[in-house]
Image (cartoon, helix red, strand yellow):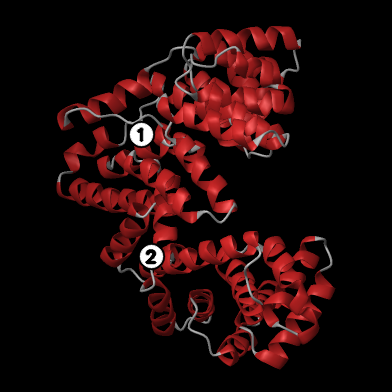
Amino acid sequence: MRKFIFYLFLISLLIVSCSQDNKGYDALEKGLIGILEKKDEGYILQQLEKSAEQKNEDVFALAYVYLGTQGEEFYNKFLKKSNGYAEYYKAMFLKETNGSENEIIYLLESSAKQGNNKAYYMLGSIYESKFEFSKAQEYLKKGKDAGEIYAVYSYNYNKNLSDVFSRIEELNKKLKNGTINQEEKKELGTLIVEKVSNYEEGYNILKDFLSEGYPPALYAKAKIIESEDKEDEAIQIYNEIFMKNKYYLAAFELASKLVKSSKNYELAMKVLDDANSDETVITGYKGFVYENMKQYKKAEENYLKAVEKNDIGIMIYLGSLYDNMGETKKAKDIYTKAYQMGSVDAGYKLTYLLEEIEETKLKENENNKKENSKDEKKEDVKKSKEAKRILENLVKNGDDYSMVDLSLYYPEGDPNIRILNLKAAAKLNKTAFYNLGVYYYSKKNKAKAKFYLKVAKENGYDIGAVFERYIIN
């Protein structure tokens, strides 16, 4: 979130000290418990405001969840006083309530200036939605340079399609000023449907071409119909434009439905082959289908075709394939590449793989030095320093699942476990509720242990037979 510019030898210290900073978490926890127990709103707001006054940044996420579209007054109290978090969440509130775009942009720019780098990603997203990709990239680059992982992803994605997006931007200006011709209009709508996946905007541009059976126009119409729970009608259109035109996006839709509904991989592959397309959505999905058919060499070949075009999502599938085939180095390399390009999912996968590698090393050491095995088994704590650094970065970027996973790197009862899981619980992460229950159980705080375990169970988390009995007694 904040951009830290310090000497390299201080970075690891800063990460640790930041995770140990418990300012405002007592009040945040009281507010959280108050929300979960449905206490008086005045009491809850008092605790949330107290936490914010103590410069706690996570409380704004909790306030956003709790207050929803009623939170403007809360955010107004902390403008210019919260390192940009009040501005950021007020901007999110205004987006939800169809507020002024100019005010939203002003708030996000103010947030970014105060150190909240996530605001750069949101600014980039606003300009992307307006097809002003040059302006979007300016903000996304600032976010990327500051280490904001979602900005990193979007910047790299846009850069990979820079020629396409430049053309969209050029044609969109012509559309706005009324100088676009029919062929250019068709080109613009097609690019918006196929490369931006904005079906509503694409359809609005292409609907004039429905009468001629133009596949991207019909496809956009089908996607909109499907989003209105009219799947059968949408499938009819997909079938029509596939049979007549072998349109690649229709082929993908039909193949994916065959796989999801009946696991008919052979027929799905025939549909994909008939499309005769080298678009990454086709080659990537062919890789997935081949993998499920246990034809791993062909799966790898098709995944690689998509990866060679820098498809970050397919990199994760390829990494998973390598991992399942026992090719650990290849898996690590491709996960690392995707993570460095901004994929949070690749970060998860990489941490799990690194931890498996570390566990294997430890087991080998235990076998060689059995006298140390007792010490190793005292604490069930994750060990990989490299994996921990990745999770620390994802936590810094506000990812609640990483907060939960990072807490596994601390020994039982460590205060960092409480802080990290409170951060995640502020976003209503059910695993965090369970972990807080276990934390307080280890601290022999029965009231809080039972409270959080019950909340975890109520939210669908399997707390296990032992804790089931514990919360009853």
Say few, some or many: other residues with alpha carbon within 10 Å of mark 2 (under 14 / 14 to 19 / 20 or more). many
**Residue at the location (63% across, 64% down)?**
175
Residue at image point 57% right, 23% down: 60
Q: Is residue 156 left or right of residue 384?
A: right
Q: Is residue 473 visible?
A: no
Q: Which residue is mark 1?
A: 409
Q: Amino acid at mark 1?
A: Tyr
Give the number of the mark in front: 1 or 2: 2
Earlier sequence position, callout 1 versus callout 2 = 2
Q: CA distance from mark 1 to mark 2?
A: 24 Å
Residue 65: mark in rendering: none
Identify the image quadrant of the C terminus: top right
Please tell me whether mark 2 sits on a helix, a strand or a loop.
helix
Q: Viewer-proximal residue, 64 or 377?
A: 64
- Which residue matches tag 2? 319
Answer with left or right where residue 411 lies relative to residue 110: left
Which quadrant holds residue 310? bottom left
At label 1, counting other C-alpha atoms closer than 10 Å, the crowd grade (few under 14, some 14-19, many 20 or more) is: many
Coordinates of residue 334 in the picture (x, y in percent): 33, 63
Q: Is residue 94 above or below residue 42?
A: below
Q: Amino acid at mark 2?
A: Gly
Kindly check if marks 1 and 2 are in contact, taking CB atoms under 8 A apart as contact: no
Classify residue 105 as left or right of residue 342.
right
Number of numbered discs: 2
Element type at marker 1? helix
Residue 128: x, y in percent? 54, 52
Residue located 53% across and 74% down the image: 281
From where the camera sits, is residue 363 visible? Answer: yes
